[in-house]
Image: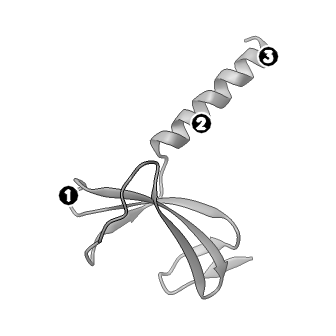
Amino acid sequence: MTVANAAGLSLTSGEVYRLTIQNADATLYELVDVTAISSNTLTIERGKEGTKAQEWASGSTVLCGLTAAQLAQIGDISTALTAIIGA
C-alpha cells in the first residue's frame, strides 16, 4: 500500500527510507529513517549512522540519496559476489 501524507510524500507502507536533513548551507546534517505506518502516521528514527538528533529550522532541506554506510554495504556485497563467482 502506498501512503500519501501531509508532507506530500508517497511512501510504501512498511518500507524504511533513509533520509538526510540538512541546513541551508549544508554545514549541518542528520540522517533519519522514516517508515510509513498508515496514511496519517510516519515513524522517524533519528540520529542514524552516528549523526546527532538536532533541531531543524523551517526551510531545512530533506534529501533522499545514498549515504556512506549504504555505499559501503554495496561494496561489501560486490566483494562477496566477486569471491563467489571468482571474477
Mark 1 or 2, nearer chain start: 1
Label 3 Cα crowd, 10 Å radius (few <14 / some 14-19 / many 20+): few
**Dot 1 amino acid type:** Asp
Please name the residue that numbered disc 2 is placed on.
Answer: 73
Residue in view at x 71 percent, y 18 percent: 82
Query: Do the residues under discs 3 and 2 have CB atoms within 8 angstroms?
Result: no
Report the mark closest to the observer, 1 or 2: 2
Element carrying mark 2: helix
Q: Residue 61's x, y, as percent?
A: 33, 66
**Dot 2 amino acid type:** Gln
Name above or below for residue 24 compared with residue 58.
Answer: above
Question: Residue at the top extreme?
Answer: 86
Residue in view at x 69 percent, y 76 percent: 2
Q: Residue 35's x, y, as percent?
A: 61, 69
Question: Residue at the right extreme?
Answer: 85
Alpha-carbon span between mark 1 and mark 3: 44 Å
Please name the residue that numbered disc 1 is placed on.
Answer: 25
